[in-house]
Amino acid sequence: MEDLIRQLLVDVGEDPSREGLVDTPRRVSRSMRFLTGGYAVDVHALINSALFDVDYSEMVIVKDTDFFSLCEHHLLPFFGKCHVAYIPRTKVIGLSKIPRLVDAFARRLQVQERLTNQIAETIQEAVDPLGVAVVMEATHLCMAMRGVEKQRSFAVTSAMLGAFRDRDRTRMEFLELIGRRHA
């Protein structure tokens, strides 16, 4: 990867032997490996290690989880907040595993729509709850820095499964609890 970064620097008109750029290929390589570290995470093992039998059937919400990802189209960052809810049948997932799951999928080359669905579908498969809801709000630097150059816009995506899709009251309760009227 370092050789590719050196060539990229040359292709944009820079001198990779310049003092400020000498270590850039190594730093960018390490950065890319960190930012795409989600490919190495086994999300099923992550969740299955923290499933617990509990007699609880009310909504569980983890909201305002910060996330950072890279747009697969431009390799530019997008970042924001993720809100996740589910209604357990017989099992709950350890609360800290939800932000870890968000990170596992966010640290891959992504589009926000797929990222939202991956989180919801993984929880649905692992926990078998009555329903799962995920809302993601993100600023995309590919929209802010290039293209349409809209710095204050953000994208909102949602995935509603089970009771959150089928029951308007359940969906509205979730959206009100995370501070959104619509998603």
Image (tube, grey):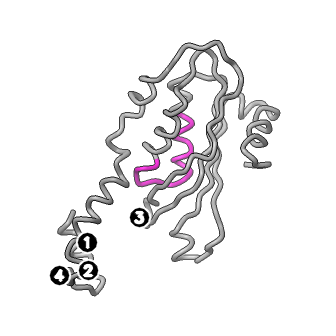
Q: CA distance from mark 3 to mark 4?
A: 24 Å
Q: Are marks 1 and 2 in contact (CB under 8 Å)?
A: yes
Amino acid type at mark 4: Ser
Q: Are marks 1 and 4 in contact (CB under 8 Å)?
A: no
Query: Which residue occupies 82% across, 33% down?
Result: 169
Q: Nearer the viewer, mark 1 or mark 2?
A: 2
Amino acid type at mark 3: Leu
Which numbered disc covers residue 24?
1
Whether 181 is drawn above or below 31: the answer is: above
Disc 4: which residue: 17
Q: Earlier in the sequence, mark 1 or mark 4?
A: 4
Which numbered disc covers residue 20?
2
Q: Are marks 3 and 2 in contact (CB under 8 Å)?
A: no
Query: Which residue occupies 63% across, 59% down?
Result: 155
Amino acid type at mark 1: Thr
Disc 3: which residue: 75
Q: CA distance from mark 3 to mark 2?
A: 22 Å
**Residue 176 spot, x, y in % from top left:** 79, 42
Mark 4: few/some/many CA within 10 Å (<14, 14-19, 20+): few
Q: CA distance from mark 1 to mark 4?
A: 10 Å
**Residue 140 spot, x, y in % from top left:** 55, 64
Query: Which residue occupies 41% across, 34% down?
Result: 43
Read off the magenta span: 106-121
Q: Single out the residue that lies furthest toward the right.
A: 169
Q: Are marks 1 and 3 in contact (CB under 8 Å)?
A: no
